[in-house]
Image (spheres, rainbow, N blue to C red):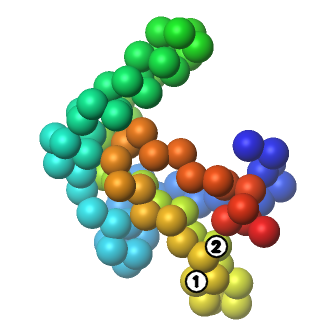
Amino acid sequence: YNLGDIPQVSDPAGILYKRFNLKRGKIRELLGLKVLLRGIKVGLLDKHGMGIEQGDIFQMPGIFLLKDGQVLKKYLHQNAADRPDYENIAC
C-alpha cells in the first residue's frame, strides 16, 4: 500500500483493541457474501492462498492515525472484506 515508512502496532494481547472499542465480528461480518467473494478473488484468483490462523480470528480490525496522543483519523471495518483507502487515511 506504499506505506512502508509508517509505524504499525501489533497487539496480540488485544489491549489496544479494547481501548479503541474495536468489536469482535459476528458470522455475517466474517463470512457474509461480500467476505466470501473477496476471499475467492484474493485467495484463488489472485493466488494469495490462505494463511494459518493466528490470534483472535473474530477480532475486527481498525485503522487509526495518531498524532501527539490524539486520534486524527480512524476507519472501523464493517466486515472482513473492507479495504479502506490506506493512503488517504495516512495523509
Q: Is residue 42 above or below residue 6?
A: above
Question: Element type at marker 2?
Answer: strand
Residue sticking out furthest to the left: 27
Look at mark 2 in the image and give the residue it sits on: 65
The amino acid on which the numbered mark 1 sits, given as a three-letter code, is Val
Instruction: Rate crowding at label 2 as few (under 14), some (14 to 19) or many (20 or more) other CA atoms within 10 Å.
Output: some
x, y percent for residue 29: 26, 45
How packed mark 1 is, by other alpha carbons closer than 10 Å (few <14, some 14-19, many 20 or more), is: few
Tell which of 13 and 74 is nearer to you: 74
Give the amino acid type for the residue marked by disc 2 in the picture: Leu
- Residue 35, percent across and down? 34, 33
Q: Quadrant of residue 51?
A: top left
Q: Is residue 77 visible?
A: yes
Q: Residue 61, position in %: x, y? A: 42, 55
Relative to 34, say whether 78 is above or below: below
Residue to which mark 1 is pinned: 71
Q: Is residue 67 above or below residue 52?
A: below
Which residue corresponds to the image point at 66% horizontal and 55% vertical from the top-left? Answer: 86
Residue in the picture at 34% in, 47% down: 79
CB of mark 2 within 8 Å of CB of mark 1?
A: yes
Query: Quadrant location of the N terminus?
Result: top right
**Regarding mark 1 in the picture, which secondary structure is present there?**
strand
Residue beneath the point at 58% across and 60% down: 9
Q: How many marks?
A: 2
